[in-house]
Image (cartoon, helix red, strand yellow):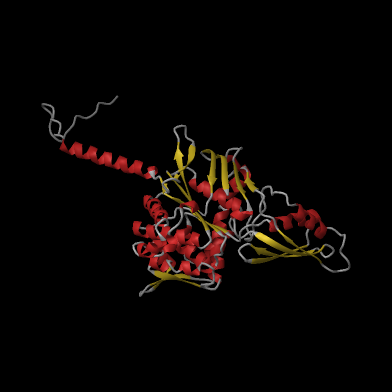
Amino acid sequence: MRLQLKHFGRIREADLDIRPLTVFVGENGTNKSWAAYALHGLLRTMSRQAGSVHIGVEAENPELDSVIADLTGDEGVTGQGMTLRSIRIGHDAVLERGLTQAGLAQMLALESAMLDIGATAQLDYNLDDLPDHVVDLRLESNPKLKLLAATATMATGNTFAWRAVDWDSPAQLAGLIKQFATTALDRVLLLPAERKAFTGLAGFDRALDALRSGRQGAIPLAWVDFADMLREAMGASAQVSSLADVAKQFAVLTGGSLQADRNTLNFQVKDGPTLPMHGAASLVRAVAGLDLYLSRLARKGDVVIIDELEMNAHPSAQLALVELVAMIVQAGVRVVFTTHSPYIVDHLNNLMAAASVPAAAQPGLAEQFALKSTQAFIAPEMVAAYRFQGQSDGSVAVLDVLNRDRARISWTTFTEVSDRLSALWDSVDEAKSKPAPEAKAGAKPGKSKPARAA
């Protein structure tokens, strides 16, 4: 799966291979978050979550087109009976989704004029890239009643049912069927950098209602999706997702557990009090959304995008966080995250190196890691890393910084700062060792001659 960006913010052109675990690093203001939001917008168009919209061009599927023609026409329908067809969806063709200036501006809640008129984002993929794609589709249609019922079976074994009624035209129904047939994931979730404020709000449900009722387009669509996810997760049963066992690792990370029902969200400190979320540690609030999603809603084949993974985390907690992310990926959820942390990048290098250790030695090695799980050891083939680097002309270059031969991510974006800090220390040390300059003859200590007015 490849993400292509052109004339987007400071990025003139970029081509990124989005692997099961993909990392964006770089200086502030280099459009890492914008790239993450663009990816969210593109993936959202192929998801089955509420409110997703179809944008882009799909590859042709003659068999699907023939079935749609049968189902949406009047021929072959007798009385009030249903026409039934069942087909297998092909998955070899390369498909694409695209966003232009207006669509990208909508994702970011910006005025279109704030982006270059030539701004585009495109995602090229085949359905095998996303394991929750439709492989079998059962369609029942009665055009006279304007009723369609669809049941899809995904490659993961998940099933999904959908109904359409009172469509305006056969062409509109055909578009709906084609969109449904080519969906490839159940959910894409972006955890914004502002997520801590969402989960720490007093009057949680009322605050989210106020957020949703604001002027359309006033906030990024990813924020609305995140708020909707929180509401859905709080109303869902605990420990029901396919990644609930992975979610139990949050207790190691935070020293407690979330207590959630439809209207309240609290944090139970291990062997301590139950706190309202606004009274919990900042790290707890930063990871609460991910915790709720993993324990109650997550399914294999989902995509999670995290803006600033390390938010509010001490370096030791950052090590646990990157191990947790690797475990999420190994469990079947694709993860993309942005980071400014050398600890995150360096520890991801450790995890890739550990994956090459003989299997018999891995359990003993895992005991030295934060979460003590071999499931955090991730093969380099599953990882991609990109540095967003500012250029002298003001543009941003997006560089592949994972050396495949050495299976290591280059973190020069951080070592450059470390080298500068060392140089400054040497400069300060040198300045301390120099004798103070002698005062000029006749000058009084601590006093200077007042400046003359011009």
Q: Residue furthest left?
A: 442
Where's residue 29, x and y in %?
46, 43
Quarter occupied by residue 223: bottom right
Where's residue 105, x and y in %?
59, 46
Name the image quarter holding the C terminus: top left
Where's residue 231, x and y in %?
55, 66
- In the rendered structure, the answer to whether residue 241 lies left or right of residue 435 reads right
Residue closer to the observer: 304 or 128: 128
Quarter occupied by residue 69: bottom right
- In the rendered structure, the answer to whether residue 116 lies left or right of residue 420 reads right
Q: Residue at x 42, y 59 (%)?
A: 323
Q: Is residue 205 visible?
A: yes
Q: Is residue 109 visible?
A: no
Where's residue 11, x and y in %?
52, 39
Q: Residue at x 63, y 43 (%)?
A: 100
- In the rendered structure, the answer to whether residue 113 lies left or right of residue 396 reads right
Quarter occupied by residue 147: bottom right
Residue closer to the observer: 29 or 329: 329
